[in-house]
Image (cartoon, helix red, strand yellow):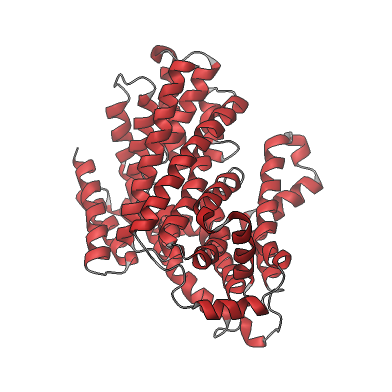
Amino acid sequence: MLTIVLLLLSVAIIVVLTAKLNVHPFLALLGAALFFGLCSSMPLDTIIKSINDGFGITLGKIGVVIVLGVIIGAFLEHSGGAYKLAEIILKIIGRKRVHEAMGLVGFVVSIPVFADSGFIILNPLNKSLSKRAGLSIVGTATALILGLMITHVLVPPTPGPIAAAGIIGADVGLVMLVGLVIGLLSLIVAVVYCKKMGSKHYIDPNPDISEDEIQEKIKQAPTAFKSFLPILVPILLIVGKSLIEFKLTEEQATTAWASAVSFIGTPVIALTIGMLLAFLLPRKWDKTILSTTGWVGKSLTDASNIILITGAGGIFGTILQNSGIADTLADSLSTANLGIWLPFFLCAAIKTAQGSSTVALITTASIIAPLLISMGFATEIDKALVVAAIGAGAMVVSHANDSGFWILTQFAGIDVKTGYKVYTLGTFVVGTFAAFLVYIASFIL
């Protein structure tokens, strides 16, 4: 019970420091991590190790991707390419359907691409679309990341769902089908929610540029096809890697061509290729563009802030993971007689406590697997629904211990308080709705 109270107090400390006292999120997260570690009587050497590992491992996975994504975004913005794309897309979908478009794009992209990487790649397009349509970045960015998160937790071959399916012993194809149906219905709720929240919380997608400046950039912009390449090519490369790893046998995966596709399909290499394509966007090349005072230098200054905050979020999450709070919550809930709601509540508790959706999915599946027969889940469809319930719980809730929370708020320019009001609440609404759909399906199927 003490650890849960300390978790709530830690979150409150982060909110008060960042929203009320305007303390930098890096300091707030580091302070909250130390508060939790010391007050929960964690060994001092474990606290130090958690700080080092949390910062290092988190940035080892996403740090370079953040830098490359920011550079691509800078070239798309300064060359006018992002606004050129936005103008064409708006002509096709209309100004009133940006939320739907970003949610659906996120939903599709995140099936093979990690949600964090997908958001970083698509953020420049979303910002330019929102600016041109006169919409708040709060609604459109949240629609994008919720779309990404839905398939990230529900649909294989994303690592979390496919690992959970393997542990539960569920048919992967059936899990994919159930996840897609529940995910698409949940996406509708997500879009409606984001439109409502966007109308309540207005934040300019890019306050530093006026409409006249946008029109001038569009006149000097590269072609739409050329502008789209830095976004599309990395996605296709990452998708190709996922398809190969999912479909090829171990022997086939060791061939030279499979190794090459796997190499260029890793997010770091894929975004490096995207960055090189972005270098082709300026109509007139100025040698200062790559300097410390040019587009690259300014974008790296922006990236440093995001990297520090994301790393500090990793520290907070790792402190919570190493405290054993997930085991405490699992022990408390695993004996409860809640039917199909048990895997949802258990996964939601673990996700909220330690931040990682993938860890929550795998941990919950490992706890639930031995209980399947006693809970009455014996058929293939039962197992697929259990995996979907676990996936729904892996959305609930995203907050300060989740790197996705900081990727959203920092890349989109959303303050922490609004992030909690909109995105954290959004993951609760959409995840709970997905669980409700699983509950209904358990009676029908």
Q: Residue 74 versus residue 261: which sits nearer the camera?
A: 74
Q: Residue at x 40, y 31 (%)?
A: 435
Q: Residue 134 versus residue 6: which sits nearer the camera?
A: 134
- Residue 172 in the image: state x and y as whole percent: 60, 27
Q: Eyeballing the image, is 377 above or below 386?
A: above
Screen quadrant of the N terminus? top left
Q: Residue at x 42, y 52 (%)?
A: 195
Q: How many marks?
A: 0
Please identify the quarter of the rendering in which residue 380 is found. top right
- Horizontal relation, residue 138 to residue 332: left or right: right
- Residue 420 in the image: state x and y as whole percent: 32, 54
Q: Eyeballing the image, is 293 above or below 93?
A: below
Q: Eyeballing the image, is 284 above or below 204?
A: below
- Residue 269 in the image: state x and y as whole percent: 66, 59
- Residue 409 in the image: state x and y as whole percent: 40, 61
- Asked if one can make out residue 400 in the rendered structure from this viewpoint, the answer is no
- Horizontal relation, residue 210 to residue 216: left or right: left
- Horizontal relation, residue 206 to residue 255: left or right: left
- Asked if one can make out residue 93 in the rendered structure from this viewpoint, the answer is yes
Please identify the quarter of the rendering in which residue 223 is found. bottom right
- Horizontal relation, residue 395 to residue 272: left or right: left
Q: Residue 279 versus residue 35: which sits nearer the camera?
A: 279
Please identify the quarter of the rendering in which residue 94 is found. bottom right
